[in-house]
Amino acid sequence: MQLDSSGLVVLSREECFHLLASAVIGRIVFTDRALPAVQPVNFCLDGESIVIRTAIGSKLAAATRQAVVAFEADEFDPESRTGWSVTTVGHARAVREPAELARLAALPLLAWAPGSRDHYIVVGAERISGRRITEGPASTAGPRWAPQR
Amino acid sequence: MQLDSSGLVVLSREECFHLLASAVIGRIVFTDRALPAVQPVNFCLDGESIVIRTAIGSKLAAATRQAVVAFEADEFDPESRTGWSVTTVGHARAVREPAELARLAALPLLAWAPGSRDHYIVVGAERISGRRITEGPASTAGPRWAPQR
């Protein structure tokens, strides 16, 4: 079990994709007018790529055009203070080829938000990394964290 | 009820802070060597600022030094396809004043990850925005989305 400099468990590439496949919501991270921006999206894995549906004129569609973006998914349990996160970095591209569009339309990926969302963005996972926080002694500095809900 | 161009409910500033106060995990979005980067963190609201604990030498501490960062928290229910997200954008700063450090150390904020994490980063919510997806007719294009877990 490999630990990073923060004491978190480093996940293998295979574990990262396995966890991504179990998630339905992730967050796409991009730059919007020179400022950091982030938007939650539901997504689907297609091989080693992340597939997102959006509206053709959306800010997301414009901001991710040929851009390098990050994509993150995670799952945490506040009670046990355990969980995992996986982050990918790669080029985003709009899908234009009719054959690829038809293939992606058959994926189990329904847009949650209302309206027409037939614009597909594919994000390559050119870099992928993940970490897991396992149960263990937490930092003793400061008062004990207590779940608030 | 105000809707944005995507048909999502626009949350008021008060609703955004109320929802942020109910969350324990968020994601800080920054730039790391010219690439978009994102890291989940547990956090605490201090007035209208976001407080994060990290290790002094961490990548997060280095990358957010005097930087403009985004911070996002959300909660989604895959069954009903509803949820909310709140995003803030503001300057991050490391806390150095002993009086402020002592005050922040009294917040109910315990680092989840192991090791010493007595470096505090405060992110001002200079801009805050939020959206809610309510139940309603989803996009009809493509097959019906089915929860996979």
Image (tube, coloured by chain):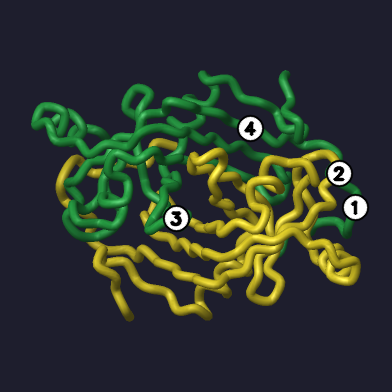
Chain colours: A green, B yellow
Locate the N terminus of chain B and report the quarter of the image it occupies. bottom left
Q: CA distance from mark 3 to mark 4?
A: 22 Å
* Residue with the mark numbered 4: A131
Q: Are marks 3 and 4 on the same chain?
A: yes
The secondary element bearing badge 2 is classed as loop
In the image, which is nearer the foreground, mark 1 or mark 3? Answer: 3
Q: Are marks 1 and 3 on the same chain?
A: yes
Q: Mark 1 or 3 closer to N-term? A: 3
The secondary element bearing badge 1 is classed as loop
The secondary element bearing badge 3 is classed as strand
* Residue with the mark numbered 3: A37
Which chain contains the residue that carries disc 4? A
Q: Contact (CB < 8 A) between labels 2 and 3? A: no
In the image, which is nearer the foreground, mark 2 or mark 1? Answer: 2
Any part of residue B76 in sight: no
The residue at 43%/30% (across/down) is A21
Label 4 crowd (10 A; few <14 / some 14-19 / many >=20): many
Which chain contains the residue that carries disc 3? A
* Residue with the mark numbered 1: A141
Q: Is A71 drawn above or below residue B6 in the view shown?
A: above
Label 1 crowd (10 A; few <14 / some 14-19 / many >=20): some
Residue B116's disc is 2
Residue A110 in the image: x percent, y percent? 26, 45
The secondary element bearing badge 4 is classed as strand
